[in-house]
Each structure stands twice: as structure tokens, then as C-alpha cells.
Image: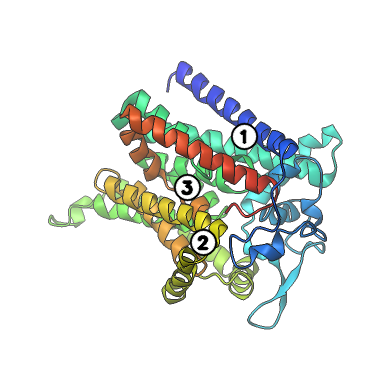
């Protein structure tokens, strides 16, 4: 990547960050939404005028517009710990009371805590310092993801197409999450670079980044599937196997075995056990719970037969983004099998998690989408139309998040 390109990407990133954060501030000064939000069956109870009372991590004034919903858990882990006494404890299937913090992975809060150390010089409160650190970590992760995405697609799409892919990532309807105290920015930075190192055949780096990706969000296990497919496809199965098992072939197992070992170590630790307990006992989520997921989607889609316009908008966006992400992965499957399998695994884990919500945010990490959109974006009409629709939808979702309304 040339210095000129690096400069362009950084300038776009800076401008985008200023615009998104500025929009959240200005929109909050101009108008307030009507409460509560009836988008989902449970959101009315969580979006009233006093719904944030008793949630200290969501009440800190500094960068409060960038802190909502799951952000309180990340801040709690970063400022306190998984056993933070300020956080709520919930009953789990085995009868214990366990902190809700365990439903969230620890690498993002760990990085937030590290970055917060030099930021103490500004004299902010502990929560305010952590919020500033969280936004910076998310933004820097996003910048890293932009560079990786650019490199992943530039050989096919050249500079203009790679530039479109990066831009479409930033303005995706839920792209504002990349600038909040959420894991999406860091996850994309780690996952996209792991895929790029795989593409470059730098096995050790791919494996190490896959470990940190997995420790950022559970869906990071999708990288193991992607790397395994890459290894399988590298073998000519119609030919004699033994001569093909060279040193390079064995090195290709590094990015599979490293994150697999990291996952198993976490899974059988207290963090893994409590993660699944809280996910099942409080958040009603599981791994590939297909039957329950199908029932959940059938129930959710009933909203289109009601007068609930808020719910219709939410689920229309969920369905469109799932369809776009899935179609994109199949379109890129032949040329980019590892990238496509990673995306399909991310989609499958999300769609069949048992609870049909937050899908538009979960689809944000699927790289095939930006590659396909960048291909289609060669058509100027599509480029302008998609950009207009995407930016307007991102503005809507960012506005809702700013006021602690449901945005995914």
C-alpha cells in the first residue's frame, strides 16, 4: 500500500469518526424521541425515561452518547472485573447467581483497561476514562480493519474498488457501532487481518490474531472453520496424499490449532462455563439451537401482520442485511473460500443463536458483503443509491442508539 493510499484511508477514517460522533452530539441537542421504544416485545421496559437508573456505567456524562446497552458490561469489566459488585447478578440453570458480565468476552475490556492508563492524565472519572479508551480502541480497530479490507480486495478490484469496499464498511447501516464502546471495531480489525495473513500465507500471525479475535467475541470461532477449509482445499485429494504433506502443509495447521486450543482453554474455564450459563439462563441464547431459532423467527415475523411500525422497521433491516450478507458469501465462495466460509459461519452462529435480534449489527463483520458491494458499486447509479440508503439508515440507527433506544 502506497503512502498516498495510507494517507487517504486515514483521512477518511478521521473525517468519518468526527462526523459520526458529531452527529450523535448535534442530534441530541436538536430533538428527542418519543419514549418508550416498542420495537421488540421487551424494549418498552428498557427504554423509558428512568430505565437507566441503577446502571452507573450508563450515567457518566462524558461520552454518554457512545455508551448504551452492552457497553455497560464492557465498561464494568474494564473498570472493575467480571465480579464487579455494581453489576447485576442473575440466576442460571444450575441454581447459582452469576454476574451478567460473564456473557461478554474479556479481550476488548482488557485492551480498554490498558489504553485507559495513559488517559488518566486528563483527570476524568474512572468510567469517563474507560469510555474514552473504549471509543479509541473501537476507532483504532476500525482503522486496522479498513487497511486489511483494502488489501484483501485490491488485487481483484484495484484501488478504486478497494476504496469503495472500505467506504461501504464505514457507512453500512449499523456502521456507527464501529465508533462506540462496542466490540465491533476491534473484532473487525483483528478478524480481517487474520484473514489477510492467511491469504498471504503468514500462518503464525494468522493464528495469533485468530486467538485474540476469538477472545473478543464468541463468533471468532468462525475463523477456525475458515482456516480449516483453506487447509482442506490446499490438498489435491485425487492425488497421493503423503508427498503433499510437506512442512508448509503442516505449518498451515498453526492458525487452526492455536485458536482451537485457545477456545478449548476458555470453554472449560470458569469464564466459559459462566458464559454459557448466563447466555442460556438470562439472554436465552445458545449455539446453533436451530429448533428454538426457527420458532423465534416465526414469532418475530408476526410483527408484519400487526400495527407495530417500529418492529416492522427493525425486522425489515434485520432480514435485508442477513439476505445481503448470505448472498454475498455465496457469490464470493469460489474465489474467496476462506473469507466466504468465515462470513457464512458468522451468519449461521448469529441467525441460529435462539434470539432473532441484533442481526444487522452482527452482519457488520462479514467481509464478503463489502467485496460484493464494491463490485456492484462500479455502476455509478448503484453506488449513489446504496450510499444514500446506507447513510440515511446509519443516521437513523445512530440517532436511536444515542438516546438509548433499540438500535441492535
Q: Quadrant of residue 20?
A: top right
Q: Quadrant of residue 80?
A: bottom right
Kindly give the residue lying farthest to the bottom in the view shown: 95
Q: Residue at x 65, y 48 (%)?
A: 401
Give the quarter of the figure containing the N terminus.
top left
Question: What SS does tag 3 mark?
Answer: helix
| Contact? badges 3 and 1 (CB < 8 Å) | no
Q: Earlier in the sequence, mark 3 or mark 2?
A: 2
Q: With respect to residue 293, does 118 lie above or below?
A: above
Q: Which mark is residue 365?
A: 3
Residue 203: image location, x then y, percent: 40, 44
Q: Which residue is mark 2?
A: 263
Q: How far apart are the alpha carbons under marks 1 and 2?
A: 35 Å
Q: Residue at x 61, y 36 (%)?
A: 139
* Numbered disc in front, either 3 or 2: 3
- Nearer to me, 97 or 107: 97
Q: Earlier in the sequence, mark 1 or mark 2?
A: 1
Q: Which mark is residue 20?
A: 1
Q: In the image, 113: left or right of 308? A: right
Q: How far apart are the alpha carbons under marks 3 and 2?
A: 20 Å
Q: With respect to residue 155, does 335 lie above or below?
A: below
Amino acid at each position: 500500500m502506497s503512502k498516498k493510499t495510507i494517507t487517504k484511508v486515514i483521512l477518511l477514517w478521521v473525517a468519518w469518526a468526527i462526523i459520526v460522533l458529531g452527529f450523535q452530539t448535534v442530534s441530541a441537542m436538536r430533538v428527542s424521541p418519543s419514549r418508550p421504544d416498542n420495537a421488540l416485545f421487551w424494549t418498552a421496559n428498557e427504554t423509558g425515561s428512568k430505565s437507566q437508573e441503577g446502571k452507573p456505567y450508563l450515567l457518566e456524562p462524558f461520552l454518554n452518547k457512545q455508551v448504551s446497552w452492552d457497553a455497560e458490561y464492557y465498561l464494568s469489566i474494564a473498570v472493575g472485573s467480571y465480579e464487579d459488585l455494581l453489576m447485576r447478578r442473575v440466576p442460571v440453570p444450575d441454581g447459582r447467581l452469576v454476574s451478567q458480565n460473564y456473557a461478554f468476552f474479556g479481550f476488548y475490556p482488557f485492551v480498554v483497561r490498558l489504553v485507559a492508563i495513559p488517559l488518566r492524565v486528563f483527570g476524568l472519572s474512572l468510567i469517563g476514562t474507560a469510555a474514552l479508551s473504549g471509543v479509541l480502541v473501537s476507532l483504532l480497530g476500525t482503522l486496522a480493519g479498513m487497511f486489511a479490507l483494502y488489501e484483501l480486495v485490491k488485487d481483484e478490484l484495484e484501488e478504486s474498488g478497494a476504496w469503495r469496499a472500505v467506504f461501504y464498511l464505514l457507512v453500512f447501516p449499523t456502521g456507527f457501532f464501529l465508533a462506540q464502546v462496542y466490540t465491533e471495531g476491534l473484532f473487525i480489525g483483528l478478524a480481517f487481518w487474520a484473514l489477510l495473513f492467511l491469504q498471504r500465507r503468514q500462518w503464525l500471525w494468522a493464528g495469533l490474531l485468530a486467538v485474540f479475535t476469538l477472545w473478543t467475541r464468541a463468533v471468532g470461532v468462525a475463523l477456525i472453520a475458515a482456516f480449516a477449509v483453506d487447509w482442506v482445499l490446499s490438498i489435491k485429494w485425487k492425488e497421493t496424499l503423503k508427498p503433499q504433506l510437506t512442512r508448509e502443509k503442516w505449518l498451515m495447521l498453526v492458525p487452526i490449532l492455536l485458536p482451537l486450543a485457545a477456545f478449548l482453554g476458555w470453554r472449560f474455564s470458569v469464564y466459559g462455563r459462566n458464559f454459557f450459563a448466563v447466555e442460556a439462563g438470562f439472554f436465552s441464547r445458545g449455539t446453533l439451537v436451530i429448533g428454538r431459532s426457527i420458532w423465534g423467527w416465526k414469532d418475530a415475523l408476526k410483527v408484519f401482520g400487526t400495527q407495530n411500525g417500529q418492529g416492522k422497521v427493525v425486522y425489515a433491516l434485520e432480514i435485508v442485511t442477513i439476505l445481503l450478507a448470505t448472498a454475498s458469501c455465496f457469490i464470493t465462495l469460489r474465489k474467496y473460500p476462506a473469507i466466504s466460509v468465515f462470513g457464512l459461519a458468522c451468519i449461521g452462529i448469529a441467525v441460529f443463536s435462539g434470539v432473532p435480534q441484533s442481526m444487522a449489527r452482527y452482519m457488520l463483520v462479514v467481509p464478503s458483503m463489502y467485496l460484493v458491494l464494491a463490485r456492484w458499486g462500479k455502476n455509478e447509479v448503484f453506488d449513489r443509491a446504496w450510499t444514500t440508503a446506507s447513510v440515511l439508515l446509519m443516521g437513523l440507527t445512530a440517532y436511536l442508539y444515542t438516546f438509548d433506544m433499540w438500535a441492535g
